[in-house]
Amino acid sequence: MPSEPAPISDAARHALQQELADLHTERGTVAATLQDSDSVVGDKADEADELQRADELRRLDDRISEVTTRLSEADVAGPPSTSMVGVGSTVTVRFSDGSVETVHIGETAAASDQMLVTADSPLGRALLGRGAGDTVSYDAPEGQAAAVVVSVGESPDRSG
């Protein structure tokens, strides 16, 4: 975890808020099936099921706490910078083959964000702390690669 709160993109914030809502719903469902430990009637299998539900409740509570903390930290951090690449930034990059892509720098991979580059990936690490016009090099599956940061913030094809 970084020492300072890191901003997150709007898409990442929305995904975390949705996950939090889903976690609360799932927690409510699991909690409704949990019985008072003194009232468990049945055999060892019933007791084991009850323990498993209690473990699941703890796991859900832990994840709810993590997501809530991350959203609070993002609120403190404010919006992503538009001058330097950081977690939460939207970055337009021109690769050495001439292709241009706009990517989002995130903490963890999200299946819903096809353009997400994690901050700990080779490209993500190379982009962090860089600004428009900077050239970065990074390890790609096919070997060393380079790219130029075109812009940080909104993608260049968006009109104001």
Image (spheres, helix red, strand yellow):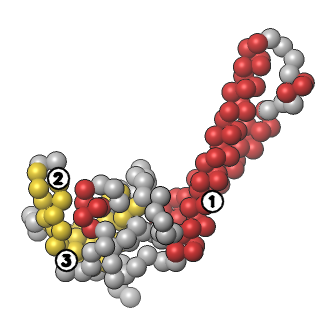
Point out the tag, 2 or 3, that comes first from the N-terminus. 3
Visible in this render: residue 94?
Answer: no
Residue furthest out toward the front: 3
Q: CA distance from mark 1 to mark 3?
A: 35 Å
Q: Residue at x 22, y 74 (%)?
A: 149
Residue at image mark 3: 134
Residue furthest out toward the top: 43
* Dot 3 amino acid type: Asp
Point out the tag, 1 or 3, that comes first from the N-terminus. 1
Residue at disc 3, secondary structure: loop
Point out the tag, 1 or 2, that comes first from the N-terminus. 1
* Dot 2 amino acid type: Ala
Residue at image mark 1: 68
Q: Is residue 25 above or below residue 42?
A: below
Q: Is residue 36 above or below residue 24?
A: above
Q: Is residue 81 above or below residue 95?
A: below
Q: Would you identify the image quadrant in which residue 152 lies?
A: bottom left
Visible in this render: residue 56?
Answer: yes
Residue at disc 2, secondary structure: strand
Q: Would you identify the image quadrant in which residue 102 lies?
A: bottom left
Nearest the viewer among 92 and 133 is: 133
* Dot 1 amino acid type: Thr
Q: Would you identify the image quadrant in which residue 129 lies?
A: bottom left
Q: Residue at x 27, y 79 (%)?
A: 131
Q: Position of residue 36 (x, y in %)?
A: 87, 31
Q: CA distance from mark 2 to mark 3?
A: 18 Å
Residue at image mark 2: 140
Q: CA distance from mark 1 to mark 2?
A: 34 Å
Q: Is residue 120 above or below residue 51?
A: below
Q: Position of residue 17 (x, y in %)?
A: 59, 60
Residue furthest out toward the right: 39
